[in-house]
Amino acid sequence: MSPTIRVHDPRGYPPEVVGKQLAPRLENLEGKTIYLVDCLFDNSDVFVEQLRRWFGEHLPATDVRPVRPRESWADDPELRARIEADGDAAILGVGL
Amino acid sequence: MPSVAVHTHVFARLVRSVATANGMPTLRQAFVPQPVVGRTADELRAYIDGTDPINKSSFIDTVINGLTSPLDGQDLSGLSYTRSTPRLLDAETEENLHRLFSDRGWTDFAPVVLPTEERVAAMLAGTSHAPDEVVGRLRPTAYREYWELTVEKVAVNAVMAGASPAYLPVILAMAASGVSGRSSSTTSQATVALVNGPIRDEIGMNYGIGAMGPYGHANVTIGRAYGLLSQNLQGGSVPHETYMGSQGNFLSFNATFAENEQASPWEPFHVQHGFKPDDSTVSLFLGGWYTVFGGGPRETWQEKFTRALQACDPFTGPILTLDPLVARGFVELGFETKQKLIDWCVEHARLPAREYWDNQWIQTLHRPRALAGVEPYASMLKAAPDELIRMFRPEDIHVVVVGGETGAMWKMIGGGPRLTMVHIDRWR
């Protein structure tokens, strides 16, 4: 029988995961304000515009507002504050 | 606020693992087919009217239900958990351990040196730092969670790569950079590493013949250690979950070399960037996507260089790696400094504006800056379609002298603008 040895685990130390609660959902989208957040990947603006049009055709009582962060892959605190202040929900997309 | 994130279907495993690592495994996510890039408005509208390929239901129903369906218990509690990694694995035969390391994605699929306690202790003699000192944190990309790494964990991966203890300060500096050698980018970027200063000679790095190939124990094993520690200490580099490079990159195996400071007619790279000649540094360039090759400078070098620069991806400027023969040739042509050559490249690297702005990553990263008024991009966006505009800023291009003077050869390697420099000496 081959001898056994002990060796180090080569992996790093992952952070503890703390569960987060999802935000309460809306009863419906009637009269609500939904922000469509364009994540700025190439052509995502075209997708967001098509999504805006879909809402305009099928849920015209929903106020749909496309928005763009100032920069790709970076937080935009001002935009986030605006969405939190007067939005009811957000849809974010899309890459690639 | 209720939200739904929309992704293309190839990212399904990745985005679900990210949501889980953020304590929200039931985060509402909807999917459309890949790709979005290059699709027309009508084709994207068809995605919206069609089926979510992952959830197997109407895409728009997935979105609307994601915003309006009541939450259940798991939605309200999220998911809390710890993921401990033991210091030592259970005793096993060497054969079984090699299989375990390979099966769990802890190797680059070439055989590794098993990190026994004795070998790791010997490796740790290469630094004065305590084994439990935290070196830094790594992650495969900006939206993932950071994993923490200690001196001992870096030494473990250095052993696996076959490195010698004398190399450990260089490897620790790379680990401390916060820059992963296993980025998950879809572009398959690699991390090119350049070593400068006295440590090159102290540990026998090759900066002469074959410096960028498998012709130096230090170059090869330091580069391999950087790759292994990146994947193992950041939480993995697994296709579909923590690695999404569509084609992969040969330079991910190893892209570590040293500058031939002795044969260079110019300042060493680290001195250009404010370090002292006696400092030892490692410079990490995110990129490695392309390589353009040439010789000279000969009579038509300006035409050749201009074409070569235009062949570079405009999103990332090149690292010019010049054999000492080439560097001295440029000095004879009047380029007394690296900066003069960089300035020439900036002036002559031009593309029609329509071609520059048609680049996917220019669209993704520079166009939003242009629209926000950030210069020089805002002015470049105003250019007429056929106007020749500059591809690079001076800080996007770097010059390094490397090679053994057997031929007047040069390369342009992608990776210019995203540079991180780390002092090696503090890790001795």
Image (spheres, rainbow, N blue to C red):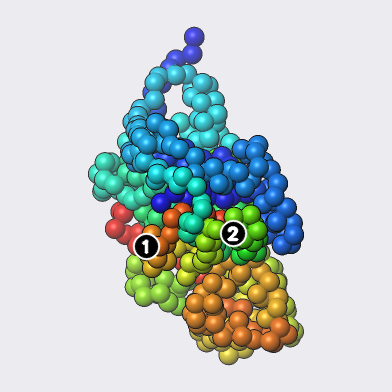
Above or below for B405 versus B253? below
Chain assignment, label 1? A
Mark 2 lies on residue: A60
Q: Residue at x 47, y 70 (%)?
A: A70
x, y percent for residue B75: 41, 36
Q: Quadrant of the C terminus of chain B?
A: bottom left
Q: Residue at x 68, y 43 (%)?
A: B51
* Residue A85, numbered circle: 1
x, y percent for residue B93: 47, 18
x, y percent for residue B289: 62, 60
- Helix or strand or loop: what does disc 1 sit on? helix
Q: Earlier in the sequence, mark 1 or mark 2?
A: 2
- Helix or strand or loop: what does disc 2 sit on? loop
x, y percent for residue B385: 71, 83
Asked whether residue B164 appears in the rendered view, the answer is: no
Question: B383 or B190: which is nearer to us?
Answer: B383
What is the spatial separation of the Cα atoms under label 1 and label 2, in whole angstroms? 22 Å
